[in-house]
Amino acid sequence: MMGGLQQFFNKNREEVEIDDDYQQPRKGYDSLTTTFHDLPIPIQLYIFSLLDAKTVCHISASCRNWNRLCNDEILWKNMLLRDMESWETIQHSTHPDIYSNNQEAEELTNSTRNEELTAKEIYLRCSPESSRLINNQNDSLRKFSSIIRSMLPKKIPKIAMFGPGLETSTSGIVQQMLNRRDVFESLGMFPGQFEGCGSGFTMRMNSPSTNCTFNLITLYSASKMEREKYGNKNEERLKNNRLFDNQERQKGVYEVHRAIREVCRNVDAFIFVVDATKGCEQDVSNGQIELNAMLHDLWSLPAFPVLILSCIPSVQVERIPCIKVARLLKLHKLRKPWSVQNCDTFTLAGIAEGLSWLVERAIRTSK
């Protein structure tokens, strides 16, 4: 291929008139050696598309021509479509659909797009790596703010955890949270405060980046015996879900039970667990019925955050990308701060990042 390109350039070098505005750096017009700059623009863009976003941003500072190419709209659209499948987290403010001109973005209920952003701007605004770089730059300020906040009195947030992922192949997440002393420290139990709800756990997260404490209430759809009986049958789980009011459910309306409403009114945040094992897309999509019923505005304030743990039982299992989980649950319609976080229930990888975000938002909201 390169030999053919060399012959093409040698044959046409004197025939092509070069516009000064688009002239690319060369070793010399009389040189017989073809440089990268001599390649056709589409080929240069294709090569750039094989690089990661950080490298492309660095390359854009090399020269005026590369700056123009590295800001190509189609280049960044393709990079966005490629990379967002591997992102470990998506949040209400970093969902690409919020800023893109597509049908889902037009249906947004709690977000307005006051400006049209380029694909590059959307990428840099939504990419978790970009967020980490910004946080690292502000690390000193964040540490100082954290010290000040730790000196102020604050209440321990109550968090309600529920969802179909607590009753499938990822059900071991609760036991792992209680047993993994290197990640969580159980400080004790507190009695059930609401009818039909058992006791909860006061837990502290032992993470290098955070040391937050929270009260955790776990809500299951049925007893352990019933859960083992139904197994992974999502239809049976929805039909016999004890979180829902039985009379309303018979009418085809999914509304949470009165006692569960009291739980929702008295907690500061929510964790919704889904089994994101590849092939479970329909089960994830069905989970939006339970999610929307629990987070209804009548018994849950819009400002209270929700963390969606997109779980797989082990790192060897192929997962549904978290961007797809957000779309299956139609989170763009949710009138709450939300975050989808990839999590491995065996190692608990990813859970510290998600819970740090949730607890920080809950403390800020409950003041």
Image (cartoon, helix red, strand yellow):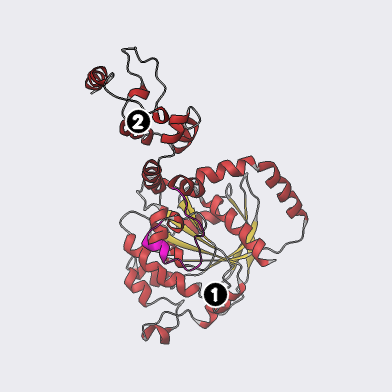
The answer for how far apart the CA atoms under marks 2 and 1 are is 61 Å
Relative to 19, 268 lies left or right: right
Please give the residue where the numbered disc 1 appears in the rendered image: 197
| Kind of residue at badge 1 | Cys
Mark 1 crowdedness (10 Å alpha carbons): few <14, some 14-19, many ≥20: some
In the foreground, 86 or 59: 59
In this rendering, would 73 be left or right of 155?
left
Q: Range of the magenta residues? A: 101-118
Residue 13, position as x, y percentages in the image:
28, 19
Please tell me which residue is depicted at 47% across the width and 70% down the height of the picture: 220
Earlier-in-chain disc, 2 versus 1: 2
Asked whether 147 or 49 is in front, the reply is: 49
Image quadrant in which you'd find residue 286: bottom left
Find disc 2 in the rendering and name its residue.
44
Could you say where residue 125 lies in the image, as x and y percent from the top left?
Answer: 51, 49
- Quarter in which the N terminus is drawn: top left
Residue at image position (26%, 22%) is 15
Please say whether residue 102 is one of the residues in the magenta stretch: yes
Disc number for residue 188: none
Q: Secondary structure at mark 1?
A: loop
